């Protein structure tokens, strides 16, 4: 049986052992830190070189820009992070200024069309107007670019939000008040009906489509449908009223749900 140390000798041996492990741990940590620092410097140099050669392609080609953002996401890099956010990528790549410029243009479009659409604009309409404003070709600005530009506005508390009332259809709201579920549902129906609805149509579609979304079976009923439609005009400002319809039934038009023709 091994003899256990006792007294001051055992205490001294334990202290020396602890000190040795502590020294070894510090040495390994220093080596690891030096290795990581070296890797970061190498990566920073490689990214700077990449930015120098492809900076124009990133800003000009949406497909290239999307692929670049995917690469950054896989590497855990935020290409919009500047010095204040603990990064240098924005300065190296020049993407920060590009997205801030786009964000200003998004605000410009949203504000200039607010009187017509009540502060809700469809993504396709926004992209068309941005492309015309920038003098670029169709597709030069993507929905992902707009979403990143809106994210750049978040620290300012501008209140710009997005919603998807129907698959593949994104709406941008430029007012701080969010749309409730009823108004979002109306926009979805209007988008599938050329931009307009009336009370019978809302009654019919609420009964046939919204059961799967958890609504009461049988739809909203005429009173509720009429109330929500009136709110769209008087409270939300997202719809226009047409009392001159051929059939005599009042119609509500939602500019954000209309597919606008190209403006000459």
Image (tube, rainbow, N blue to C red):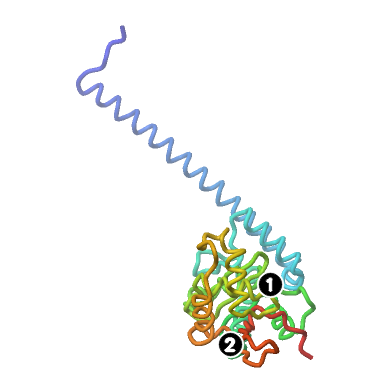
Residue pictured at 51% horizontal, 47% vertical: 33
For the C terminus, the quadrant is bottom right
> What percent of the width, then of the height, locates residue 227?
49, 80
Residue that extends furthest to the bottom in the rendered view of this protein: 244
Mark closest to the chain's N terminus, 2 or 1: 2
Query: Residue, x 58% and y 91% (percent of image)?
Result: 115
Q: Is residue 65 left or right of residue 7?
A: right
The quarter holding residue 79 reads bottom right
Q: Which residue is mark 2?
A: 114
Disc 1 target residue: 192
Q: Position of residue 226 (x, y in %)?
A: 52, 80
Mark 1, secondary structure of its residue: loop
Q: Residue at x 64, y 68 (%)?
A: 92
The residue closer to the viewer here, 12 or 68, is 68
Q: Quadrant of residue 164?
A: bottom right
Residue 188 in view: yes
């Amino acid at each position: 049986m091994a003899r256990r140390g006792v007294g001051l000798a055992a205490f001294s041996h334990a202290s020396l052992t602890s000190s040795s492990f502590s020294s070894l741990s510090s040495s390994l940590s220093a080596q690891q830190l030096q290795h990581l620092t070296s890797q970061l410097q190498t990566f920073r140099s490689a990214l700077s070189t990449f930015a120098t050669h492809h900076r124009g392609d990133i800003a000009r080609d949406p497909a290239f820009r999307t692929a670049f953002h995917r690469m950054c996401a896989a590497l855990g890099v935020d290409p919009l992070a500047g010095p204040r956010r603990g990064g240098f990528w924005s300065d190296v790549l020049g993407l920060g200024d590009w997205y801030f410029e786009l964000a200003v243009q998004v605000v410009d479009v949203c504000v200039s069309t607010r009187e017509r659409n009540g502060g809700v604009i469809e993504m396709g309409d926004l992209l068309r107007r941005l492309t015309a404003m920038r003098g670029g070709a169709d597709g030069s600005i993507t929905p992902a670019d707009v979403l990143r530009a809106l994210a750049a506005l978040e620290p300012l508390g501008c209140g710009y939000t997005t919603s998807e009332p129907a698959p593949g259809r994104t709406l941008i709201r430029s007012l701080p008040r969010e749309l409730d579920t009823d108004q979002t549902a109306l926009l979805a129906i209007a988008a599938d009906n050329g931009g307009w609805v009336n009370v019978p149509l809302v009654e019919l579609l609420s009964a046939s489509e919204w059961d799967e979304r958890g609504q009461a079976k049988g739809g909203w009923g005429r009173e509720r449908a009429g109330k929500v439609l009136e709110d769209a005009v008087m409270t939300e400002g997202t719809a226009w009223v047409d009392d001159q319809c051929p059939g005599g039934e009042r119609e509500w038009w939602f500019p954000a749900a209309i597919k606008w023709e190209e403006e000459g």
